[in-house]
Amino acid sequence: KKIFISVFMIMLLLIFITQLMDNITKIKQESENIKIKKVKNEYEFASNWRLHRDIREYWIPIERKDSYNNELQYYSRDNVCFDGDAIEIISKKEIKEDKEYTSGLVESSCAYKYGYFEFTIEISQGKGIFPAIWLLPEEDKGLPEIDIFEMIGSQPYTFYGVIHYEQDGDKKSDYFAHEVPVQEKYVVALEWGKDRLIWYIDGNKIYETESGVPQEYMYLIINQAVGEDWPGNPDDKVFPSRFKVQSITIKPMFMKGRG
């Protein structure tokens, strides 16, 4: 009888120890999950907080005389205004060096690989202006190029999104043109994944493609060109013309400084 009781007590002790070890393992796993989740959320919060802390730390106004595609502007730092979280680019009819127009262009000080990019914008209209938000490779080359938002002033309520890329030595592109209503503000966004690009306007999914998806770090550009082959020669009555980016949300999968 004593032996039976001893065996029974030992079995109970073993069951208790087994349950205790299982509980310790579960608690440890839950603790690790909470820790991972906390670190992830803190990183996301810190990333967004830094990007909004002082917008001038993350956007570089560019001074540039040279233009492309027969553009007519001189890009001047004086034509870029920072106001809180907003960036305002002002295009003017004025002579600087041998250019008859001035405008503004900013580049991001960071490069990104994959992620979600959202911009609340206000646009102007008028023949010859060409606002855009786009991405170029960190490496000094022209392709691939992602145009998150483009429009021409003579057709201000048609928004474009484009991916330009090279495949087997040939230059290719995939794009959409989308009619938008007349309103004060718009929200344009791009979701850049490893295997697809998705564009959104005012929270609605507009276009998706798997063509030419970049697999490299890219930096952002916000600008307003004047003239060029596509928008044509400007109507001087439109100046000064303003392109305002009121808020910017950037949630990259990978991010680094551009040096």
Image: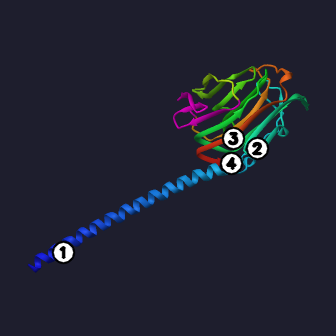
Q: What is the spatial separation of the Cα atoms under label 2 and label 3, in whole angstroms?
A: 16 Å
Residue 247 shows which numbered tag? 3
Which residue corresponds to mark 2? 60
Q: Give the range drawn in magenta.
A: 184-213
Mark earlier in primary sequence (3, 4): 4
Which residue corresponds to mark 4? 52
Q: Which of marks 4 and 2 is in front?
A: 4
How packed mark 2 is, by other alpha carbons closer than 10 Å (few <14, some 14-19, many 20 or more), is some
Q: Give whichever of 237, 58 is nearer the camera.
A: 237
Mark earlier in primary sequence (4, 1): 1
Residue 9 shows which numbered tag? 1
| Label 3: which secondary element | strand
Q: Which of marks 2 and 1 is in front?
A: 1
- Whether pointer 4 and pointer 2 mark residues with C-beta atoms closer than 8 Å, the reply is no
| Label 2: which secondary element | strand
Say whether residue 231 is visible: yes
Residue 250: quarter of image: top right
Q: What is the spatial separation of the Cα atoms under label 4 and label 2, in whole angstroms?
A: 15 Å
- Whether pointer 1 and pointer 3 mark residues with C-beta atoms closer than 8 Å, the reply is no
- The residue lying at 83 percent from left, 29 percent from top is 73
Say whether residue 212 is visible: no
Mark earlier in primary sequence (4, 2): 4
How packed mark 4 is, by other alpha carbons closer than 10 Å (few <14, some 14-19, many 20 or more), is some
The image position of residue 194, as x and y in percent, is 53, 38
